[in-house]
Amino acid sequence: MTEKEKLIVFLSRMEVSNKKIEKLLDCLDTFDIDKVLKSKQALDVFSTEEYHNALKNYDRLEFENSLENIKKSGIKILTIYSKEYPHKLVDLPDRPLVLYAKGDLGLLNKKSIAIVGTRMPSNYGKMTTEKFARKLAEAGMVVISGLCYGVDEIAHGNTLDVGGKTIAVVGSGFNNIYPAKNTNLAERIAKEGLLLSEYTPSFTPKRYTFPYRNRIVAGLSDGVLITEAGLKSGTLHTKEFALEYGKDIFAVPGSVYSEKSSLPNELIKSGQAQCVLDAKDILDYYGIDVKRERTKAVQLSFDEKKILDLLADGEKNVDYIAEKTGLSVNILNSCLTTLEIRGLIRKLPAQMYAVN
């Protein structure tokens, strides 16, 4: 880590605004923290309270040790000058200057969808979130959310359950996950996906950190999907950030009598969001071939591929499949069973089969 990056990390811990930090960086000719804290530029940019707070809290040895301990715990520190810093955030006006990351950094620049909504979803909201998360993840999209109660945790959990990839942007430090009940889920995400925060690992969450982190959720995504949320939901913050950043917004309609569906219904009505009834609507919008993406990750035998190619045109009876593929009954049944177990096809009534 360069001296410039160390300076950014230290100042971000002092809760100095990002704008002030960037303003200071622009007028410095040295980035050594000791020298910066004694410089006229720091006095000019920071308030008296901020300046003295920084002086009071800086201990070079303690700071260096903390960086080393973070590294040993498997956490990567990204600054705006790091090569791994997500390009989707670089040009945002309120971009985070520092990100703490644990997991697969390669997910940051992949096609992604944020799934957000109420912390107290109805059964309809739970089923809808589960359905969309699973299908989008199976198609190869990275699912992003905030690891809170309700829609967030459902989106993360179901994505992982189908072998998909997810990014959780938390409003706290990694050692103080909120809500605490999702600590195990956070650990699983760090192993199988990516955990992100702009706060140091020991940071205790505050009320303002949750709506503020939503700018990162929106910024990292290519689009934002709202499955269920009320008009006064915190999801509004994510929606506003998404609009400001020019992101695609999708919404699942719900009953006109359900308060929990009032936000997506209103967004659809006002034209701020596209109405989606199935994950395929989103995949089609981005030009993602569901069948190609789902079969890419698995090794298919020649016979299995023949069956999938045949079913790509629509539902087929087992006798028709046998006739067109020329496979024996034993081999055909074996292939159909294998494909069904893998979740690539499903069996329908009257010996019919279809691609999932």
Image (cartoon, helix red, strand yellow):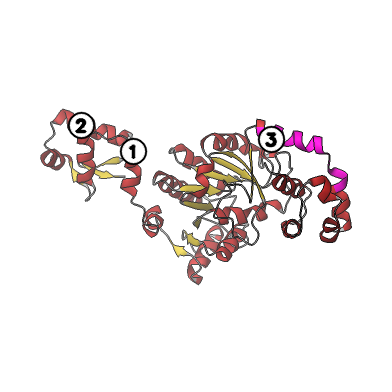
Name the N-terminal-most of marks 2 and 1.
Answer: 2
What's under tag 3, amino acid-wise? Ile
* Residue at mark 1: 343
Structural crowding at the residue carrying mark 2, measured as other residues with C-alpha within 10 Å and reported as few (<14), some (14–19) or many (≥20): some
On the image, the x and y values in percent for residue 142 come to: 47, 47
Mark 3 or 2, nearer chain start: 3
Mark 2 residue type? Asn
As helix, strand or loop, the secondary structure at mark 1 comes to: loop
- In the structure shown, which secondary structural element does the residue marked by tag 2 occupy? helix
Say if the magenta span includes residue 162: no
In the displayed structure image, the side of residue 203 where residue 187 appears, left or right: left
Which residue is more in the foreground, 94 or 162? 94
Indicate the secondary structure of the residue bearing disc 3: helix
Per the model, the C-alpha gap separating discs 2 and 1 is: 15 Å
Tag 1 near tag 3, CB within 8 Å: no
Residue matched to label 3: 70
Q: Quadrant of residue 238?
A: bottom right
Disc 3 residue crowd, few under 14, some 14–19, many 20+, Cα 10 Å: some
Sequence-wise, the earlier of marks 1 and 3 is 3
Q: Residue at x 73, y 52 (%)?
A: 207
Segment colored magenta = 55-71
Viewport quadrant of the N terminus: top right
Residue 117 visible to an observer of this rendering:
no
What residue is shown with label 2? 333
Task: Write the residue at 51% across / 36% down.
Answer: 192
**Residue drawn at 78 percent across, 46 percent down:** 32
